[in-house]
Image (cartoon, rainbow, N blue to C red):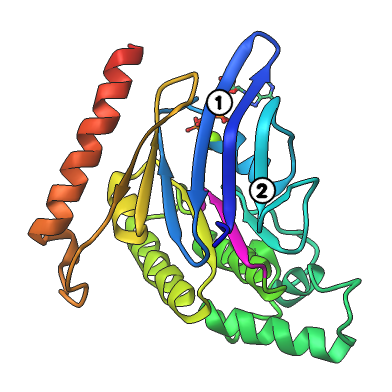
Amino acid sequence: MTAKISLRSVTKTFGALTALDDVSLDIEDGTFLSLVGPSGSGKSTLLDLLGGLAKPTSGEVLIDGKPVTGPGLDRGVVFQQYALFPWRTARANVEFGLEGGTLTKRQRAERAREFLDLVGLSGFEDHLPHQLSGGMKQRVAIARSLAYDPDVLLMDEPYAALDSQTRELLQEELRRIWKRTGKTIVFITHSIEEAVYLGQKVAVLTSRPGRLKEVVDIDLGDRSNADLRSAPAFVAHRHRLWELLHDEIRRAA
Ligand SMILES: Nc1ncnc2c1ncn2[C@@H]1O[C@H](COP(=O)(O)OP(=O)(O)OP(=O)(O)O)[C@@H](O)[C@H]1O
Ligand SMILES: [Mg+2]
């Protein structure tokens, strides 16, 4: 079976600076992969390559076995900052990705409503971004990236700016959405806890130049525990990742 996403000896340089060095990684269809690494380790660069916003200097980036040649509706990207149009309502922001497609105006509106509901924003369809909280804006961005039904969701620290309660809520929602839709998700975070909570696997990059240090499989056993984050399996995974990252940060210092 071909992997959904395949990086083959990917190197990305910016002039004399090597941001990613010989990264090879296969991500199977339907996988939730968290990506962690020190600041400057090339995480956003990697996501840009997957999103088709940049090209590798050498090596190959494949989706469904085909080289990525540019952005496409098979991939939804959620950036750290809320990339919403300030003059468009929540619904019109979600509809944006659907314009130019095959849906009628009415179908677009219906679909936008459906996905705003999915992220818990029913009743806020007609609000403008400035009338929404940070977490709500981020949810609109997530709804927008989901609405055109991409196979792959690429998320670059989408929750970094949120308070911890909202963040946990959105983590739960994202897992629920992932379970329900079976999408392949690549989720960048600086939070080890978030990486462990969300990911089936956590990929760790080294300090610059970013190489793939390790891919850790996450198995938390019974996830129904109300205090999952304190469960022994969770703590053990968190500690392991902390060691891997700490190693890198110390090496770089
Ligand atoms: N367009 C660019 N031009 C020049 N250098 C770049 C460019 N984009 C990234 N870099 C460099 O590549 C390296 C990796 O950057 P990248 O943004 O991928 O890191 P990151 O892991 O996402 O870091 P952070 O955790 O701080 O977001 C950095 O040294 C950065 O300065
Ligand atoms: Mg980054």
- Per the rendering, the mark at residue 62 is 2
Determine crowd level at label 1: few under 14, some 14-19, many 20+ residues with C-alpha closer than 10 A: many
Tag 2: residue type? Leu
Res 16 quadrant in image: top right
Q: Residue at x 49, y 59 (%)?
A: 28
Determine crowd level at label 2: few under 14, some 14-19, many 20+ residues with C-alpha closer than 10 A: many
Q: Is mark 1 within 8 Å of ligand 1?
A: yes
Q: Residue at x 13, y 57 (%)?
A: 233
Q: Which residues are magenta?
A: 150-158
Which residue occupies the foreground of this view, 156 or 4?
4
Residue 133 in sight: no
- Residue 76 coordinates in the image, percent (x, y): 66, 60
Question: Which residue is the extreme one toward the top?
Answer: 16
Which residue occupies the foreground of this view, 216 or 60?
60
Q: Disc 1 designates what residue?
A: 20
Question: Which residue is the extreme one toward the front?
Answer: 1
Q: Secondary structure at mark 2?
A: strand
Question: Is the residue under label 2 in contact with that under label 1 (CB below 8 Å)?
Answer: no
Res 115 quadrant in image: bottom right
Give ligand 1's quarter of the image: top right
Q: CA distance from mark 1 to mark 2?
A: 16 Å
- Residue 9 coordinates in the image, percent (x, y): 57, 31
Q: Residue at x 36, y 53 (%)?
A: 201
Tag 1: residue type? Leu
| Precedes in sequence: disc 1 or disc 2 | 1
Res 105 quadrant in image: bottom right
Q: Secondary structure at mark 1?
A: strand
